Image (cartoon, coloured by chain):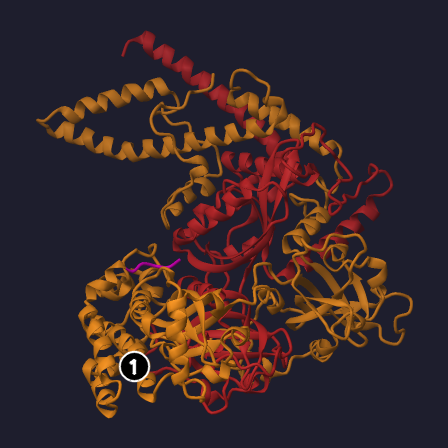
Chain colours: A orange, B red
Amino acid sequence: MRPQPPSGTPAPVCGMSAGGCDGAADWPADVSDGSSLPAVELPRKRKGDMEERNSTDCKMEDDLSRSEEEDQQVKIKCFREPHRQIEKRRRDKMNNLIDELSAMIPACQPMVQKPDKLTVLRKAVQHLKALKVGTSSAFADSTNKPSILPQDDFRQLLLRAADGFMLVVSCDRAKILFISESVSKILNFSLLELTGQSLFDFIHPKDINKVKEQLSSWEYPQEHMIDAATGLQVQTDAPIKPTHLSSGAWRSFFCRMKHSRVAGKQEEKHQLPCTAKKKDTSRYCTLHCTGYMRSCPSSQLDSEGDAETPSLSCLVMLCRPLPHGSPEPPKHINAKPSAFVTRCAIDGKFTFVEQQATTVIGYLPQEVLGTSCYEYFHQDDLQHLAEKHRQVLRSKEKIETQCYKFKTKYGSYVSLQSQWFSFTNPWTKEVEFIVSSNRVMSGPGHIKDEEAGRLKAMQEEIPIIPSLSNGVGTMIYAGSIGTQIANELIDSYSRVNSSQSSGASSPFGSTNEKCPLVSPPISTSASSGGGAASSSSQPDSRTAAGASSATADSSGQVSQLDLDGMVVPAMSSFSSDEAAMAVIMSLLETEVNVGQPGDYEDLHWPF
Amino acid sequence: MTADKEKRRAISREAARRRRRVESEVFEDLSRLLPLQQSVRDHLDKPSVIRLTLSYIRMHTLLTGKTGTKAEASHKVICGQVTDGQMVRHEFNGGCGEDEEKEKYDAEASEETNMYLRILEGFLMVLSTEGDMIYLSENVSKYMGLTQTELMGHNIFEFSHPCDHEELRNNLRVTAEEVWSGEKRDFVMRIKSALTHRGRSANLKSATWKVLHCQGRSKVCVAPSSVSCLLLTCQPLPLSHTLLSTQTFTSQHSMDMRFTYCDQRMTLLLGYSTEELLGRSIYDLCHTRDTNCLTKNHFNLCFKSQSVSGRYRMLVRGGGYVWVESHSAVIPNAHSSKSRPGANQPLCILCVTYVLSGVEEPSLQLSLDQTVHI
């Protein structure tokens, strides 16, 4: 009779535990217990007895007056209690395993009643015997090491998982000595077409030298090796750590290999990144080749192989196409000529402009780089865009602007709508730049009449010099809007930084043991320090307390700047548009949020 | 206690012992059927026997079952050629007179398999949609310090870092929902390793975390039973002893990804001098559309200490860009003050960047950093 599982919350399937190192507690019980459960006097196996013992103990708990004898019994109870827990866990685990087993065995499926443990086990034995009837006898009773999977299956599985193919080439002439069948799925060539050929026939011409270099040396030149522990190039006298490199040097490189179009095959779903070459009609895909050098006994060479070299060195590699999910080549991005991406520093100065922008704004990227975006915004839009600017610097979300007008090279305005997103450095948590996706909403021809009138008036005032708006003064003032907004942000950084202790934020340390908390590490300096101290299970040199002092330094310098000091000198230099600027500045000042440290409480990980 | 009760207890104890004996015998039968070495077999406890049996059955299903859409139904268990086209099983006609050949084949096959594993520089893991490690290749002991039989059948969540559980769960959930096989996966996870520095196995209680780069694809089996799983290769990310070709360069960065060092190959390949780059953020040097890729890479570095970026574009000085891929890791800063070795060493990021393409659109200047007067 199979004991029924005790009532109550069942143990998780297969002992899955959510805690960090908690799994370790279960582990020794499973592995070290090589024998069956000992037959002890305590009848723990039978549920009835267990309950009886339970009830006795419960009664004892309720007893308030304790004599020494009862104390003793309490102690025993306390000892048995965790033991009981362990037993319960074990039993539950076993029961779960049995259940899983019965689910996998076809013979157990149609049973109406849940079969008992012994039956399931017996059926499992039968099932295994049946499975082995039709399989390769490499399984059992082999003098070689038997393995769970037959060798061939394993290799196939591996190549499928690695999504690559095996390649063995001779080092002298790059003859393909062996290539696994999986290549046909990746390069669309058959084995016949490849085996025995020279590898260079299939490599992209520009990569041939690189591959030659990788094939050439049996012993790697020291100056090209790097040591992972220090990141420095290996010195000739430094001992190379004894790793798995017993026979030869390790190679890892990327190269492009030809891949053929097979007639009739659907190419749209092709997941390989390919670069179509202009002159050559072949298509190439980029492969990551990793492997090592070894000497091949001559028996593995074909009959044409060199007779005078009994042992040849060859390179044994696994070639994998690059993973999917990488950005598409530029040609696909150009699909929508009316959209382009730009990047600005936090003060609004362009630092990156895509080439498609030229068709929209007329300027070449280099004409615009370094200038402030505010110089191109229409006066009417300045306020709303400044507001969005301020917003995006403080938000993790994408900010949509309304439609606004952007001055093109020729003086006309084009209507754009943008999505702004501020990029925060994952380490320093500071905003580094703003990425803007800009979409053309409508051409100049769609502007309403009254606006068109005003526009025309403005156009007449515009000097012929490109990239200047009406008057040098306005340009500089416009630019300073961005600078001021940026300075507000930098000030808020310095305010936060000055309030924390000497160690700057280090998310690497504080979150190594526990999951990242929602509140940013900047303001929880105390907890990050505590977290650093408790990360005892970290390997020696990688510690939690790694502080990046650069953060504190850079913001310390900037905090010297005075908000007002930035604007006033500029204003006094130019008298003409002073009034207009004053209006704008007053609008901004009333909205200035003096960057409380509290602002950063709302920020959370963007991931 | 009455004599009667005593007697009943004795009988029930006897019955229990008998049951246990029978059960043990069946367990032994089962373990003998598993393809394991005798020495390993002797040390298996009952739950392990079941675990391994489960793995065996599941793997068998996986390899012989029909793959395809979940909508299909098939009742035949196919032993032999599989419609998948990738998996072709070799059959042996009995064993009479061919033992010697078979042994030689086995030896060669085993050698070839070892070669595959060595090239892979990692181990193979097959994960069920619940996270059970249905299968692990034998060399897993080299990376985790625990043997294949100790680990197979256990759940990955017991061995991976809790902060990576979410990502794992997502990957598994997507696998469970998939209809077609073959969707690719690529992620980094931290796993417990019971290896000491010298490579010896220690107790799991003193386990350290090892970072693994997992790549692979899903596999959906329809018949005989619906088994979806993830086939993954798990590789640690070694940066050492790599022969750097002329198309690769190394660079070091502070934790915020600003350059602190780069080797002269960077100048040859991208045109920037070392002095120009010091203090510059890598984000400024790359195409804006690749910001997400770089951010993910950075994030992996901050939390998992190692990362493989996808492909991204680095801007070349003077104009244009190249496609690159970076393998990075966080290491203690060797250049820092040597007077204080040990716990408080500051960290830095080491990157090995492979240049994948030629310079594209060389006349195009997209960024401020490319312009000559900087």
Point out the stretch of residues depicted in magenta. A603-607
What residue lies at 47% left-to-right and 74% top-to-bottom?
B350
Q: Position of residue A17 (x, y in %)?
A: 39, 42
- Asked if A339 appears above or below A227 in the picture, the reply is above
Q: Would you call the spot at circle 1 few (<14 residues within 10 Å), some (14-19), or many (20 or more)?
A: many
Q: Which residue sits at x=64%, y=56%?
A: A162
Asked if residue A604 lies in the magenta stretch, the reply is yes
* Image quadrant assignment for residue A208: bottom right
- Residue at 81% in and 72% down: A201
Q: Front-most of A545 and A502?
A: A502
Q: Position of residue A339 (x, y in %)?
A: 51, 66
**Whether residue A400 is situated above or below residue A580 in the rendered picture:** above
* Closer to the camera in the image, A49 or A112: A112
Q: In the rendered view, would you say B213 is above or below B66?
A: below
Front one among A114 and A418: A418
Examine the structure image and report whether residue A593 is included in the region drawn in magenta: no
Can residue B234 be seen here? The reply is yes
Residue B77 quadrant: top right
The secondary structure making up most of the magenta span is: loop
x then y, percent, for residue B265:
57, 85
Disc 1 marks a residue whose amino acid type is Ser
In the image as oriented, which residue stretches furthest toward the top? Answer: B4
- Image side of residue A211 versus residue B70, left or right: right
**Observer able to see residue A524:** no
Which quarter of the picture shows residue A120? top right
The residue that disc 1 covers is A480
